[in-house]
Amino acid sequence: MKTRLAALFLTLTAFALAQDASVKPGINDKFLDPKLNVEEWTKKFETESREIFHQREKIVAAAGLKPGMAMADIGAGTGLFTLHFAQAVGADGKVFAVEIAKNFLEHIKARASKASASNVQTILCTEKSVELPEASIDLAFICDVYHHFEYPQATLATLHKALKPGGELVLIDFKRIPGQTSDFIMGHVRAGQEVFEAEVIAAGFEKVSEVKDLLKENYFVKFKRK
């Protein structure tokens, strides 16, 4: 226990000090490629063998969105959840599809237009900022994306600012457990749930709940902006 706490302390210390240091250089290079093949990524992201796609409707329901809310789909990708969110918040609500990849945003625009989802707005973010207006959203949704935050402290600071006071953050990411998790996830995801939660809390959030009976490969945690 002491060893784990010491490791966590060192991680958070490094997190606080390395404001401008990348935690995993190059992790987003493929998404910044102007030749990004959206069709290829759609096949990877939107397949029944992927847990979050298979459970997408239950995940949306568990997020707790209500009609009229403004929310941000952070790292929206191919728009796997975006239109579901648009339906959940209704015509009086707003969904910001936030992405670092321009090709994904163009794809989401086309999907939203085809579905007549006029409450969807795409936002091109940067490696350090979600590029959302201050106090513009009630909820931020981050699913299998946080481990792609190359500059988590900087990004979380902008996300904290974008949320209204008391606004919520939903974090879903891969469980990373030595001896249980696949070699690919162990190498791809830089840290486990305990570390990621601590980073979010250090950015001005408090953990309010965890959905434990829905996902097996991922964890589902809710935070509130202080």
Image (tube, grey):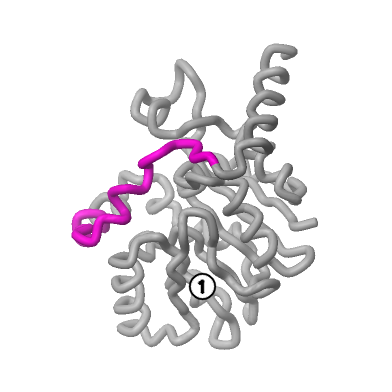
For the N terminus, the quadrant is top right
Q: Quadrant of residue 140?
A: bottom right
Which residue, given by chain and number where applicable, does mark 1 sit on?
A: 96
Is residue 161 part of the magenta span, yes or no?
no
Q: Residue at x 64, y 76 (%)?
A: 69
Q: What kind of residue is marked 1?
A: Phe
Q: Position of residue 2 (x, y in %)?
A: 74, 13
Q: Residue at x 51, y 72 (%)?
A: 96
* Side (left or right) of 90 relative to 217: right
Q: Which span of residues is magenta-colored?
A: 21-42
Q: Quadrant of residue 90?
A: bottom right
Q: Position of residue 16 (x, y in %)?
A: 68, 38
Image position of 164 with respect to 8: above or below: below
Q: Residue at x 25, y 56 (%)?
A: 33
- Helix or strand or loop: what does disc 1 sit on? strand
Seen from the viewer's position, the closer of residues 214 and 171 is 171
Q: Residue at x 55, y 67 (%)?
A: 72
